[in-house]
Image (cartoon, rainbow, N blue to C red):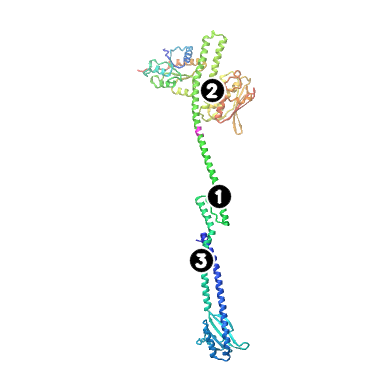
Amino acid sequence: MNPGKILLVEDNADDVALTMRALKSHNITNDVVVAQDGAQALDYLFGAKGNARAGELPAVVLLDLNLPKVNGLEVLRRIRADEATRLLPVVILTSSDEERDVIEGYSLGANSYVRKPVDFVEFTEAARELGLYLLLMNRGAPVPRNP
Amino acid sequence: MSLRDWPIKQKLTAILLLVSSLVLLLTATAFVTYEVLAIRRTTLKNLSTLGRVIAANSTASLAFANEADAREILSGLRAEPHVVAAGLYDKSGRLFSRYPANLPGDVLPVTPERDGYRFEGGYVIGLEPVAETGNPRLGTLYLKSDMQAVSRTLRLSAAIGAGVMAISLLTAYFLAALLQGRISQPILALAETAAAVSTRQDYSVRAPKLGEDELGTLTDAFNQMLGRIEDQNRELRRYATELEQRVADRTHELQERNESLRRNAAELLAANSELDAFAYSVSHDLRAPLRSIDGFSQVLLEDYGTRLDESGRDSLQRVRAASQRMATLIDDLLKLARVTRSEMRTEVVDLSKIAGDIVAELQRSTPERQVEFAIAQGLEARGDPRLLRVVLDNLLRNSWKYTAKQPRPRVEFAAAQENGERIFLVRDNGAGFDMQYADKLFGVFQRLHSDADFEGTGVGLATVRRIVNRHGGRIWAESAVDRGATFYFTL
């Protein structure tokens, strides 16, 4: 089974390091591709020409909301708008627990919404759940193939 | 037009003329009457003088029955054209002689009647006895005179009277016309002034004063009245102007205040959205470094913990505890901000059910604690369900927290009726607080217990009070140290 890549969209280097560590501590060894802002994430997913690279899609996108250039919710909207990435699992991983962000995140089709706790032990715990979720995703979610 | 509607000038003239003519008429009547009476008396006297003269002259002719002599004497009456007939009777009453000689027989009476002179049938009749002085009566003289003298005099005096009257009346008319002005002029002036006042509403006009009589007094009084009205009018106008000015000022003030309110509202809106942005930014930006502090402290502990001594590890633990506490503070502040900002929706809320849910949650979170809860059933209120949940959550959680050191903890949620108002209460038998500090209870970051005794940020009750206030209610507390606390609130 191809473990698939994880696309981590996160502008804060500390958070990137901590997230990687939390994932590693739960033996989630998938390759992690980091996009430092929304534009990079979109570039990675859709390429410069804007075509989704269906074969190379990540297994899951961990998406921060408060991002430079293109914010997380916009990235999510673009992912859901494209036929190729419509079903791509997206987990919002953010500091904000603003209700409107949660509601908008889910209404735009986020699969899950995880608020990053300050307590790193709790964060690691959240990452464990993420790992379980990822396993389920890998087993269940079909990857659409374009002709 | 009836008399009372006549102009006063005509009225006065008419009255003067009427009085003058009445007086003149009476005077003329008296004059004519006097003249007539005088001429009648004169006529009688003249006739009787004539009668006595002729009677005296006739004695001889009667005594001697000399008819020619008698005729001669009577014919002397020709000099008196008024005497139309005369007759001489002898002592037996037989007509002895007549004048004029051709007088028809029926003009003279057959026998003489009683003596004397009198008016009879438009003539003056006179019967004079004929006798020598001291001798027996010889006969009677009969004289008949017409009244032409009387009627002439009457006509003349009537003409004079009428003339005098006409001249007098004419004079009276001119005099009246001249003199009535003395009375009517001030009245007319008054009337004109009054008309000017009533038609033009001009109270500045004054009636001219033309004398010191009663009309002068009336004019003075009228002018004084006008003056007072003018003063009062001026006063009224001044008040009206003042009032207008005040209304204008007030309107202006209100407009300014409205404008300022609008500005304030706009500013408030701006401030609100700024606060919104601030809260959002706080939740993101402040938490991120905290996460790094806590996270990398943990990394240090995990990866290098063995190389640190106890004190080093303790320091890192303290760093972690502090950053987590700061995270809690930020979260509580954000919650408080949300309570203040969030839209209210009002519905009937089952407070008892919410309290039950919270209690169940508390018991689930710390199953080892044994707290006796008494939740009154069926307590409902109108309000925002989410916000009211925050109220009950804070109060019950506080009770839960502050009864931690109590051997037989008890928490109660109930309602009481006082002065027609429903008061909800959350009571516990926990640590309580000193009433001296009760006013600090609901302030942000105000705490009455040390963190070592009871954890907390001091935001909860501030949040509760904001919510209660937003519902138009009040909140207060009663307590004593170690005797528990009771929080009351209305909605």
Find the residue positioned furthest to the top.
B307
Q: Secondary structure at mark 1?
A: helix
The chain identifier of the residue carrying mark 1 reads B
- The residue type indicated by label 1 comes to Gly
Q: Earlier in the sequence, mark 2 or mark 3?
A: 3
Please identify the quarter of the rendering in which residue B490 is found.
top right
Q: CA distance from mark 1 to mark 3?
A: 43 Å
Q: Is residue B160 above or below residue A18?
A: below
Q: Nearer the viewer, residue B379 or B308?
A: B308
* Tag in front: 2 or 3: 3
Q: Which residue appears at 53% of the width and 90% of the height?
A: B68
User: Magenta: predominant secondary structure element?
Assistant: helix
- The residue type indicated by label 3 comes to Leu
Q: Nearer the viewer, residue B218 or B342?
A: B218
- The residue type indicated by label 2 comes to Leu
Start and end of the magenta stretch? B257-261
Evaluate whether label 1 is on the same chain as label 3.
yes
Q: Is residue B264 magenta?
A: no
Dot 3: within a 10 Å radius of its alpha carbon, few (fewer than 14), some, or many (20 or more) residues?
few
Q: List x then y, in percent, for residue B1.
A: 49, 61
Find the residue positioned furthest to the left.
A147
Q: Secondary structure at mark 2?
A: helix
The chain identifier of the residue carrying mark 3 reads B
Reading the image, the residue beneath label 1 is B227
Reading the image, the residue beneath label 3 is B170
Q: Earlier in the sequence, mark 1 or mark 2?
A: 1
Q: List x then y, in percent, for residue A90.
A: 44, 19
